[in-house]
Image (cartoon, grey):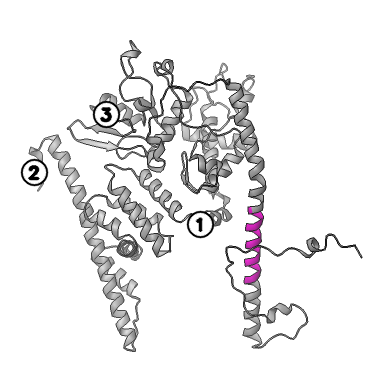
């Protein structure tokens, strides 16, 4: 049945690949729509039986799941996911379902949207989220899984920031680290920690693993595992080459300094989020979208002030092949991932590529080192562009238009610009003249940062005290209500005991109003009274 494909040229074959991919999305949409209609039919039948005084022995959801499992030869668990996904598209994400039915988005991206929006319970907010995501994704001509994840997480945090904040705090309460001994002399380390701590830990291990000589026989994964022990002992990773002239031998005076690795973490956020009270989310490099409160916490805990990723590239710097540290940081924060279609490898692990090749013989002839001519490419796609026949053109807003060897064109937009549209603007303007020296500017920035920290510290402390008081009040109310229920269950009447007389009071609401504040302690009310 595939013999006819043998007569097609590469351009026609890739056309078949693209068209069948879109057809697959359409078929998936049709299948899920049929499952949703089946579920609706089973729910209606169950409701009719209940109105007639009968009952359904099997839940309608379970009925639909059983039929889908039989038709698709799936396990009950897998079939339940199919039914729940179909219901989510039918009820919660109808506009995203329309994109899938038109073949404008694939099932992989839609499944990510379903999973990362399932905790939004408000129907009005869910409708806004469906409209926002369908409008944004419908305009994309290419996407990766990381780009979809960032878009969904940013939309959820922008539309329902309180719910996202509460989910993060609940997850923080469940953080843990566990050690499980195995039967082969090894142990398994697992747990859940804050995103920043995990990112710093990951990069610290990588840095320690790189500080051995080239003759070390271990793989990178093995060196990272061994670096954990060195990290726990506060020492550097010993090289395993066994050579007496190893440049990283322990008696080397530089060895003591190799364990002191400074971890740099890039956070992309607007200035209103960093220095003000804005609620727009930020992006933690290597992790993903974080809320505004996490951004401000990172700024307050940072060893140095954040750097504005809007570097001015001088004429001399544009003629150098190696970009400055500020320009390289701006490129990585703008792109966030590899810029090849569909690739989501983090930008921190990518090469910074000149779209127009740098002319080493005559730099002024073209290929300048500017933000508008630089992009992130992982090593695989960097080599593919250089040797594989792919062409690329970079627009002023950071969009890259790729041309495949068969002549097909693909467009990729910088992932950072999806979250922060200001990053689309060209950032390589001529430097503005200033009368102050760099040391004066640095001193002013440090003074501003310290002043901000002093002003923000009592505000954050008051907010933490209020949050703790609210949690304590809710816990106390739940306890008192529970004791009232136990009293009624076992005694059936009020208590005559002179102790804990509150047990005879009516049940208290277990949700606090937004303007609730703890009562002023008696000690504070009587602070000015005499001691007797």
Q: Nearer the viewer, residue 272 or 349?
A: 272
Q: Does residue 367 lie above or below 63 as drawn? A: above
Q: Which mark is residue 447?
A: none
Q: CA distance from mark 3 to mark 2?
A: 34 Å
Q: Which mark is residue 3?
A: 2
Q: CA distance from mark 3 to mark 1?
A: 42 Å
Query: Is label 1 in a helix, a strand or a loop?
Result: helix
On the rendered structure, is 320 left or right of 22?
right
On the rendered structure, is 193 left or right of 283?
right
State the extent of the magenta-drawn residues as a range. 463-478
Q: Nearer the viewer, mark 3 or mark 1?
A: 1
Q: Which mark is residue 392?
A: 3
- Pinpoint residue 271: horizontal percent, then vertical percent: 51, 39
In the rendered structure, are the residues bearing label 2 and label 1 in contact, judged by CB atoms less than 8 Å apart?
Answer: no
Q: CA distance from mark 2 to mark 1?
A: 57 Å
Residue highlighted by disc 1: 162
Residue occupying image coordinates x 66% and y 88%: 493
Residue 464 inside the magenta-drawn segment: yes
Labels 3 and 2: the sequence-earlier one: 2
Residue 375 inside the magenta-drawn segment: no
């Amino acid at each position: 049945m595939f013999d006819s494909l043998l007569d097609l040229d590469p351009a026609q074959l890739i056309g078949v690949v693209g068209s069948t991919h879109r057809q697959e999305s359409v078929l998936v949409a049709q299948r899920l729509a049929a499952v949703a209609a089946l579920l609706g039919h089973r729910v209606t039948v169950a409701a009719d039986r209940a109105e007639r005084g009968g009952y359904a022995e099997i839940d309608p959801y379970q009925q639909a799941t059983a039929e889908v499992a039989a038709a698709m030869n799936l396990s009950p668990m897998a079939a339940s996911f199919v039914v729940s996904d179909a219901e989510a598209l039918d009820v919660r994400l109808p506009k995203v379902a329309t994109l899938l039915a038109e073949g404008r988005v694939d099932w992989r991206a839609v499944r990510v949207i379903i999973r990362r929006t399932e905790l939004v319970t408000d129907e009005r907010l869910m409708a806004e989220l469906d409209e926002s995501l369908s409008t944004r994704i419908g305009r994309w001509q290419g996407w990766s899984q990381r780009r979809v994840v960032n878009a969904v997480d940013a939309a959820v945090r922008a539309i329902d920031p309180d719910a996202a904040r509460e989910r993060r705090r609940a997850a923080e309460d469940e953080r843990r680290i566990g050690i499980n001994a195995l039967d082969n002399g090894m142990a398994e380390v697992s747990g859940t920690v804050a995103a920043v701590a995990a990112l710093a830990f990951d990069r610290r291990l990588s840095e320690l693993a790189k500080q051995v000589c080239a003759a070390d026989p271990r793989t990178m994964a093995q060196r990272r595992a061994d670096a954990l022990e060195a990290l726990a002992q506060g020492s550097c990773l010993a090289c395993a080459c066994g050579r007496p002239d190893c440049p990283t031998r322990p008696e080397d005076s530089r060895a003591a300094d190799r364990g002191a690795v400074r971890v740099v973490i890039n956070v992309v956020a607007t200035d209103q989020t960093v220095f003000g009270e804005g609620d727009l989310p930020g992006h933690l490099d290597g992790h993903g979208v974080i809320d505004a409160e996490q951004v401000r916490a990172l700024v307050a805990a940072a060893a140095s002030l954040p750097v504005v990723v809007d570097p001015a590239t001088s004429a001399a710097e544009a003629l150098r092949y190696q970009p400055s540290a500020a320009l390289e940081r701006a490129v990585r924060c703008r792109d966030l991932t590899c810029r090849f279609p569909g690739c989501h490898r983090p930008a921190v692990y990518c090469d910074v590529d000149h779209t127009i090749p740098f002319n080493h013989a005559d730099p002024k002839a073209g290929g300048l080192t500017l933000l508008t001519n630089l992009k992130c490419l992982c090593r695989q796609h960097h080599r593919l562009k250089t040797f594989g026949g792919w062409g690329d053109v970079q627009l002023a807003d950071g969009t890259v238009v790729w041309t495949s060897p068969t002549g097909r064109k693909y467009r990729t937009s910088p992932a950072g610009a999806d979250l922060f549209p200001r990053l689309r603007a060209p950032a390589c303007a001529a430097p503005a003249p200033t009368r102050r020296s760099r040391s004066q500017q640095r001193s002013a920035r440090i003074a501003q940062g310290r002043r901000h920290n002093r002003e923000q510290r009592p505000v954050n402390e008051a907010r933490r005290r209020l949050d703790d008081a609210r949690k304590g009040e809710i816990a106390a109310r739940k306890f008192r209500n529970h004791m009232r229920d136990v009293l009624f269950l076992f005694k059936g009447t009020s208590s005559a005991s002179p102790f804990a007389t509150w047990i005879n009071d009516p049940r208290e609401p277990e949700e606090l109003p937004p303007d609730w504040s703890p009562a002023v302690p008696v000690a504070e009310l009587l602070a000015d009274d005499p001691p007797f």
